[in-house]
Amino acid sequence: MSDLQFDARGRLRHLLTLEGIGRPLLTSLLDRAEAFRVAPGEAPRRHTWLAGRTVANLFFEPSTRTRASFELAARRLGADVINLDIQASSAVKGESLEDTLYTLEAMNVDVFVVRHKDVGVQALMASHAAPHVHVLNAGEAHLSHPTQGLLDAFTIRRHKPDLANLSVAIVGDIKHSRVARSALRALVTLGVRDIRLAGPKTLLPKKGELKGELFTDADKAVRGADVVMMLRIQKERMQKAAVPSAAAYFKRYGLDARRLKLAKPDAIVMHPGPMNRGIEISAEVADGPRSVIREQVSNGVAVRMAVLQGFYT
Ligand code: CP
């Protein structure tokens, strides 16, 4: 799949995965995103990079952050945007993904932003797309969420630029998390070496499946960390009850003020959202001074602008 996303000249044509994207390209995407950041209260600048282009959001799974930020990113670059209401679309009548693609291409859609619960849907669409069309993965099953990985790396780099000497603890439902997989890929590519993956045994990947040291003791994983990234418990991807009660989970794996004190005094707290407050993170920590959770959301627009702009420069 990582081959499919580059054109014959080695330029990024689709963004399907962070696998196969090396440090120079990843760094240049993050550098370009810096120019698109908007301070709180500031009116975002309007650009014309995508003037005359049309971006279609195809979200076969729910989303608040990713969908809204792709729409804002596209509009701020001058594109027209359509948000296909999947539940009210002809997909419900059985129209195939390929026919959905061809139909929208016939209306001059240039960029498809796709979220789907199944593996391989974005690659399938990319393999059928017209030569001028771009496909962006906005969340693929448990496997990848590349722009989330980019925005997480971007946020970490802004606060902790010495990436080679960082300790990053990722805590929660690693097994079902496309966020963890893409963040890990971005961080490893950027040179982060100390990555700790913590959660109940039932929610951890198999040993060796992902980069990072595995912990079932959250205190040990968080101790001395520069970055603590909490993950959502994803009930929708679990076959059967793989976690104890919410209260028991919070006690063993949730991030509260006591557990956060184990991290470095200037550690930052991240969460991709949506949060289950009181299950994986306390409201006090989520809204506290070390939290960069809302900054992640804000950075998501800048990073997605950088990706979209890259297709047209
Ligand atoms: N982080 C993330 O993907 O959030 P949404 O599901 O709201 O898009």
Image: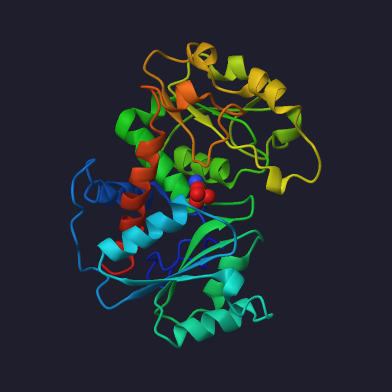
Q: Splitting the image into 4 quarters, where does residue 211 fall?
A: top right
Residue at the image position 25 percent from the left and 46 percent from the top: 37
| 174 or 214, nearer to the observer | 174
Give the position of the C terminus as an image quadrant: bottom left
Q: Which residue appears farthest toward the right when viewing the image? A: 240
Q: In this view, does 310 lie above or below 168?
A: below
Residue at the image position 49 percent from the left and 40 percent from the top: 272
Give the position of the N terminus as an image quadrant: bottom right
Image position of 297 (left or right of 178): left
Residue at the image position 24 percent from the left and 40 percent from the top: 40
What x and y, as percent, mark residue 61?
59, 59
What x and y, as percent, mark residue 5?
48, 66
What x and y, as percent, mark residue 295?
35, 38
Residue at the image position 36 percent from the left and 17 percent from the top: 266
Colour pattern of the rendering: rainbow
| 254 or 312, nearer to the observer | 254
What x and y, as percent, mark residue 54?
36, 75
Q: Is residue 168 above or below residue 103?
A: above
Q: In this view, does 49 lie above or below 298?
A: below
Q: Which residue appears farthest toward the bottom when viewing the image? A: 106
Q: Is residue 196 above or below residue 105?
A: above
Q: Splitting the image into 4 quarters, where does residue 86 fall?
A: bottom right
The answer to whether residue 200 of the structure is visible from this angle is: yes
| 178 or 56, nearer to the observer | 56
Image position of 63 (left or right of 161): right
The answer to whether residue 161 of the structure is visible from this angle is: no
Q: Splitting the image into 4 quarters, where does residue 121 fall?
A: bottom right
In the rendered picture of this protein, how many numbered marks are placed on residues? 0
